[in-house]
Image: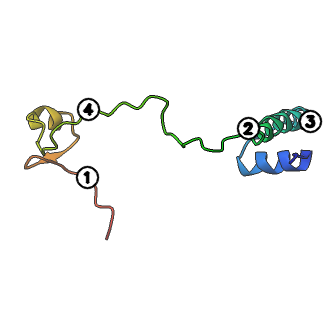
Amino acid sequence: MSVTEDDVRRIARLARIAEPTDRVAKLTGELNGILDWVEMLNEVDVQGVEPMTTPVSTPLPMREDKVTDGEIPEKVLKNAPKAEEGFFVVPKSVE
């Protein structure tokens, strides 16, 4: 697979990136180089290799899941522009 200059212009337009016309040729070459490298990965024999999410299999430490108010509601609400009865007051967004 290769990228043309028209492809680069279209990608830049979709990404809302204003690329000068003199850089389009250079970007085309860079993108084609990246795609060539990715195609080389298809040559690697992965038969029998298990997929993995991390190279180190370490279980994450677990903690008890309990609901708290943080035990400092006054400090939290102190910075709020407006608070009422222990809650943030925000403008109504749905009619």
Disc nearest the viewer among 2 and 4: 2
Disc nearest the viewer among 2 and 1: 2
Count residues near mark 1 (Cα–Cα under 10 Å), then give few for <14, some for 14-19, many for 20+.
few
x then y, percent, for residue 75: 13, 31
The residue wearing badge 2 is: 44
Q: CA distance from mark 1 to mark 3?
A: 51 Å
x then y, percent, for residue 61: 26, 32
Instruction: Name which of mark 4 and mark 3 comes first in the sequence.
Output: 3
User: As displayed, is residue 39 above or below residue 85?
Assistant: above
Instruction: Name which of mark 1 and mark 3 comes first in the sequence.
Output: 3
> What amino acid is at disc 3?
Ala
Residue drawn at point x = 82 percent, y = 37 percent? 31
Count residues near mark 4 (Cα–Cα under 10 Å), then give few for <14, some for 14-19, many for 20+.
few
Q: Which mark is drawn over residue 25?
A: 3
Count residues near mark 2 (Cα–Cα under 10 Å), then give few for <14, some for 14-19, many for 20+.
few
Q: Which mark is drawn over residue 90?
A: 1
Q: CA distance from mark 2 to mark 1?
A: 56 Å
> What amino acid is at disc 4?
Pro
Q: Which mark is drawn over residue 61?
A: 4
Residue drawn at point x = 21 percent, y = 39 percent? 80
Q: CA distance from mark 2 to mark 4?
A: 35 Å
Instruction: Name which of mark 2 and mark 4 comes first in the sequence.
Output: 2
Q: Is residue 5 left or right of residue 60?
A: right
> What amino acid is at disc 2?
Val
Instruction: Name which of mark 4 and mark 1 comes first in the sequence.
Output: 4
Disc nearest the viewer among 4 and 3: 4
Based on the displayed image, in which of its 4 quarters is residue 21 positioned?
A: top right
* Secondary structure type for disc 4: loop
